[in-house]
Structure formats: C-alpha cells, structure tokens
Amino acid sequence: MITMILLNNSYLFPHSFFLAGIPGLTAVHIWISLPFCFMFLLAVTGNGVLLFLIRTERCLHQPMFFFLAMLSFVDLVLSLSTLPKMLAIFWFGATAISFHSCLSQMFFIHAFSAMESGVLVAMALDRFVAICNPLRYATILTPVVVAKIGGLVVLRGVVLTISFPSLAHRLPYCGSHTIAYTYCEHMAVVKLACGATTVDNLYAFAVAIFLGVGDVSFIAYTYWQIVKTVTHFPSSEARAKAGSTCTAHVCVILFFYGPGFLSVVIQRFGPPTASAAKVIFANLYLLFPPALDPIVYGVKTKQIREQLFKILTPKGIDPT
C-alpha cells in the first residue's frame, strides 16, 4: 500500500509512482528491451567517443565542434536519465519510482530536451555564418561568443523547465499512481492529479509552442538564407561542398523534431487512454537522437572521420 503524507492539511503526496511500461505489450517487454538496450549502448559509446575526440584533438577546437560536443553531452544525459530505468522495467519489472525521483527525472528530461533544441539552433547559426559570411566567421563566432551562446542554451533550458517539477509538486495525488509510460513525462504525471491542473496545462503548452515553433522557425529561416546563398555560388563543386557541411545537421534536426512532432500529434489527437503507439513514439523522441546523432556526424563529417581513423589506425589509413 502506498504511504501518503499529509502536508499543510490539504496536499497529498504519494510515496511512489509506478511506471507501466508499454501498455498492452507487457508480455513482450523482454523482446522490446533488445533494441532499447542496443540504442542505449550506441548512445553512450558514440557520444562518449565524440566527446573524447573533440576534447583531445586540437584540430577539432572550432565553434562547430564545440556545439557538437554540447549536443553529445546533452544526448548522454538524456540517455542516462531515461534508459536505465526503462531497461529495469523491461527486465526486472521494477516499475516503482519514488515521488521525488520522478520529479527529478522529469526535470532532467525536459530541461535537456530544451537544451538540445537550443543547441540545434546554435548549430544552425554556426552553419549560417560559415556559409553566408565565411570571411567573418572567426571574428563573429569567437570563443567568448561561443561560450556565451552555450551558457544561454543551458540557462534557457533550465529556466523554461524548472517550473515543471515545481508545479507538479504542489498538486494532490489522491487517485491512481500508475504512469502509463516508461519515464516521468510532465503531462503524464499531471494527469494523475486530482486537483486543478489548468496552470500546468497552459504552461506546458506555452513552453512547447515557444521551443517547437520558435526554434524550428529560426532554423528554417537560417537554412532558407543558406539555400539562397548557395544557389549563387559560381561552381557546382562549391555548392556541393556547402551542402555537404549541412547534411549532418539537417539529419539530426529531423531525428529530433520528427519523432517529437509525431509524439505531440498522437498525444493531442490520439485516443485519451494510453496506447502502445503513444508510449513508443514518446520513447523514440528520447532514444533516436542520442543513438543516431554520433553515427550521422561520424559518417558525414570528414574531420571526425580522419581523427577517429588516426586513433584506430596508427599508420593513418585515409578514411576517404
């Protein structure tokens, strides 16, 4: 039985929540865990390698790769905040999570998702300056400016999402304590409350609009300017080179915003009850980017390929 603590004579706080996993697929959780485990290993290994390369190789100490290091760090935190608990649910049926641990996980998931969106905006800005103002690239994106952009990305992510656990903490939970997901998503927790949740719903919607519409619009604008600039390049070779520098970033953008958009559509317009499709898309939103981002950058970025092959092959076999 869940122990309930009465605070201020009005608010009820559960001792624990229970994460249901994937509704309707409990019998095959062990099989579902295999691709999840594989993606977790990819995320930890790939992002760890990228961080190591960018940290140790001086030729990668450039704004583009500093932003990539931020992306890898954010992806690592997202993976470590969610995947171990998911695998514990799938393998051992360890569905219980303490109330405060749930709120902590909620903060890390939403704050670092917001940071990832911010890093993608910063990377779009980097590509915009590199292609549209190449002669001023070094003077515009100085180390100080890059550090300020990174700090702003972190600050924005924290400020926008710190209210999620704070608002959820003030709500009474006097009904079911089962979260129909594999992690503590903000709105999934709020739906369990038996008090007024209008403020939570409005704030979550406002943050989603600000991050989704705002960041995507900025990225779309920068790439529209990039496309206009590239079409005026005198040679096809120059256009191809400029396009190749953006390919990896475009793929990463699609990996991050694509599952996120589908997850929001299913959440808003799908059936009110939890379904396997809802939970799977919500998981893909967190699993795909950390697992696939380092692969995309490793394959599409020549400098990273060269440094990786330099380490793996002392004789310097040409990776191209």
Image (cartoon, grey):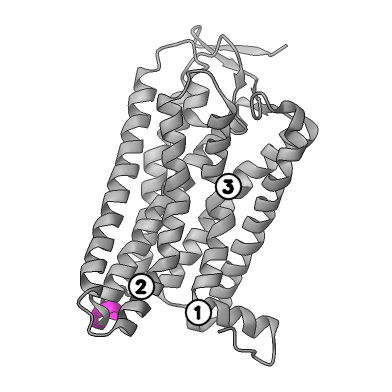
Q: Amino acid at mark 3?
A: Leu
Residue 158 vertical position relative to residue 220 in the rendered view, above or below: above
Q: Label 3: which residue?
A: 287
Q: Is residue 22 left or right of residue 115?
A: right
Direction from residue 116 to residue 290 in the image, left or right: right
Regarding residue 184, the answer to whether it shows in the image is no
- Whichever of labels 3 and 1 marks the residue nearer the N terminus, that label is 3
Q: Rounded to the nearest whole Å, what is the CA distance between mark 2 and mark 1?
A: 14 Å
Q: Nearer the viewer, residue 153 or 312?
A: 312
Residue 265, x across and y down, in percent: 41, 32
Say if residue 288 shows up in the picture. yes
| Front residue of this view, candidates 197 and 34 | 34
* Bounds of the magenta segment: 135-139
What secondary structure prevails in the magenta region? Answer: helix
Q: CA distance from mark 3 to mark 1?
A: 25 Å
Circle on res. 92? none
Above or below residue 37? Residue 168 is above
**Tag 3: Cα neighbours inside 10 Å, few (<14), some, or many (≥20)?**
many
Q: Which residue ends up furthest to the bottom in the rendered image? A: 315
Amino acid at pointer 1: Lys
**Residue underneath mark 2:** 243
Tag 1 residue:
302
